[in-house]
Amino acid sequence: MILSRITQALKTQNWFAVGLEFFIVIAGVVIGFQIQAWNAGRSDRTDESRYLLQVGADLAHDLSRVDHFLELYVSQTAAAQRVIGYHEAQGDVNLAAYYGDVIAVLYFEEHVPRYASLDALLGSGDVGLLRDERIVTQLLEINLRYEEIAKLQAHKYDDVREFLYATYGDTLDYAAGIDAWLGHPPSVLSPEVVEQSRDDLRIKNGLTVVIFNNNLLVEKLQAIRAMIVEAHGFVTETL
């Protein structure tokens, strides 16, 4: 239709009509591109919001897990210090408390964070959808810090197994210790484990190493916690 009008205008040398038709064509193309770009931008913002909600959920979940492990390491360190105190004290000790604290020290739980949102962003190549580059940068840094945590956790487990599990294995009634740890100590507990442990240098070294490793883990996790809170703030600003 437009082409026929342009042809007719050229035949009659109606240059105003020719210019007007060309303007209409060009304007239509420009508007079409703008609508397409607007739709693409709208789709990108929708995808970005979806990713940000996933990132925010992952950060919130990890924050709760970090708080759990910080509390665990602090309480475990306190238990190790009390066991050392039991060994250094003269005379009888509270056996229920001793058994419970030893099990608390021997307890091992591994923190394995899961950031499915980061995996999805990297795997799909949609990292560019996030307008705030700080979010991805922070997630990558957190992931890198967790590699250090994994090494520390593995080192701690090896130390506990070498110095404490192997040594307590022949003397400690683990079932009774777990009951005591849970607040339900048996009515009769053997005091021999305390006497034998007092003179065992490996146990003393093991308790010292547990305290050292836990302090390192607390320091590293506190730094990660601050980064998680900051990253969550970036997400909130962008949503």
Image (spheres, grey):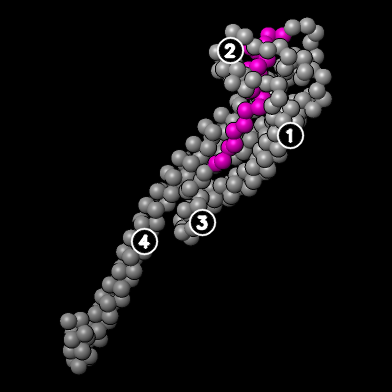
Disc ID at residue 185: 2
Callouts 1 and 3 close, C-beta under 8 Å: no
* Residue type indicated by callout 1: Glu
Q: Quadrant of the C terminus?
A: top left
Q: Earlier in the sequence, mark 2 or mark 1?
A: 1
Q: Is residue 53 left or right of residue 175?
A: left
Q: Which residue appears at 58% of the width and 37% of the height?
A: 111
* Residue type indicated by callout 2: Pro
Pick the residue in front: 85 or 148: 85
Q: Which residue appears at 37% of the width and 52% of the height?
A: 46
Q: Residue 209, position in %: x, y?
A: 76, 30
Callouts 4 and 1 close, C-beta under 8 Å: no
Magenta extent: 93-113
* Residue type indicated by callout 3: Leu
Q: Earlier in the sequence, mark 4 or mark 1?
A: 4
Helix, strand or loop status at disc 4:
helix
Q: Quadrant of residue 94?
A: top right
Q: Residue 185, position in %: x, y?
A: 58, 12
Disc ID at residue 162: 1
Q: CA distance from mark 2 to mark 4?
A: 65 Å
Front label number (3 vs 2)? 2
Front label number (2 vs 4)? 2
Disc ID at residue 40: 4
Front label number (4 vs 1)? 1
Q: Quadrant of residue 26?
A: bottom left
* Residue 147 seen in the figure: yes
Q: CA distance from mark 3 to mark 4?
A: 20 Å
Q: Earlier in the sequence, mark 1 or mark 3?
A: 3
Pick the residue in front: 59 or 198: 198
Residue designated by label 3:
122
